[in-house]
Image: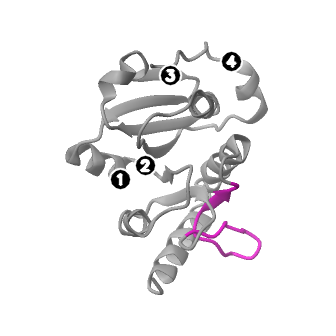
Amino acid sequence: MTPKLAPASSKLEAVCALEEAFPVGMIVEGELSDRWWSFLQAGAEMGIAWHLLAPDERQYADLLQYESGNGWLKIYENTPENVQRLWKNVGGIFSGKSLEYDRARLCVKHGVVPICPAGIFVENFQPVQEFGTGFTFREGSEWGAVQGVLRAGETSKFPYDWSLIKRQMKKQSAKW
């Protein structure tokens, strides 16, 4: 069953909207709970441009295109062509679980910054220490996930920090 997204709310935009849409990819594996749909909607309202790959996008027919302010949500079928399109068109890749080796390698290969719970392959970016390989949050925490996505979007505006994260990713990947 496809959840219905609520009408766009200006409350979230007023609190912490990004000035420009930040493209974030997400590969959906199985069903997403209503909590995660709410998270995606909140992200879109705050300026996140979601690119979702779903096993069968027809099950989300009434959500294929959702727009709100600078952000939006687009759902594509998980085909090899769409996977390539995803990796080319996003600045960050979101996962509700720690990244596995193969996905971490793809992040490095395509220069896409991970946004996920901390794990073996991703350490939280700390701008003062100039260290980190992505943006992390506690697994299962929707608000932590929102914070991670927004931090990534804001940091992407600073070329030095953004390229530093990508260099750290390449450096760390040599140890895998």
Query: Magenta stretch containing residue 135, yes or no?
Result: yes
Task: Name the residue beneath numbered marker 4.
Answer: 9
Q: Are marks 4 and 1 in contact (CB under 8 Å)?
A: no
2 or 3: tag closer to the N-terminus = 3
Query: x, y (%) of residue 141?
Result: 70, 46
Q: Nearer the viewer, residue 17 or 117?
A: 117
Q: Residue furthest top?
A: 7
Badge number at residue 67: 3
Q: Quadrant for residue 161, please give it.
A: bottom right
3 or 1: tag closer to the N-terminus = 3
2 or 4: tag closer to the N-terminus = 4
Magenta span main SS:
loop
Badge number at residue 87: 1
Label 4, label 3: how many angstroms apart (C-alpha)?
11 Å
Up the image or down, 20 lies above or below 145; here it is: above
Q: Dot 3 lies on which element? A: strand
Q: Quadrant for residue 48, please give it.
A: top right
Task: Name the residue beneath numbered marker 2.
Answer: 90
Q: Are marks 1 and 2 in contact (CB under 8 Å)?
A: yes
Label 3 crowd (10 A; few <14 / some 14-19 / many >=20): some
Tell me the amino acid under the disc marked 2: Val
Magenta segment: 122-138
Query: x, y (%) of residue 61?
Result: 36, 18
Badge number at residue 21: none
Tell me the amino acid under the disc marked 4: Ser
Label 4 crowd (10 A; few <14 / some 14-19 / many >=20): some
- The residue depicted at 45 percent of the width and 19 percent of the height is 1
Label 1, label 2: how many angstroms apart (C-alpha)?
6 Å
Label 2, label 3: how many angstroms apart (C-alpha)?
17 Å
Q: Is residue 45 found left or right of 99 in the rendered image?
A: right
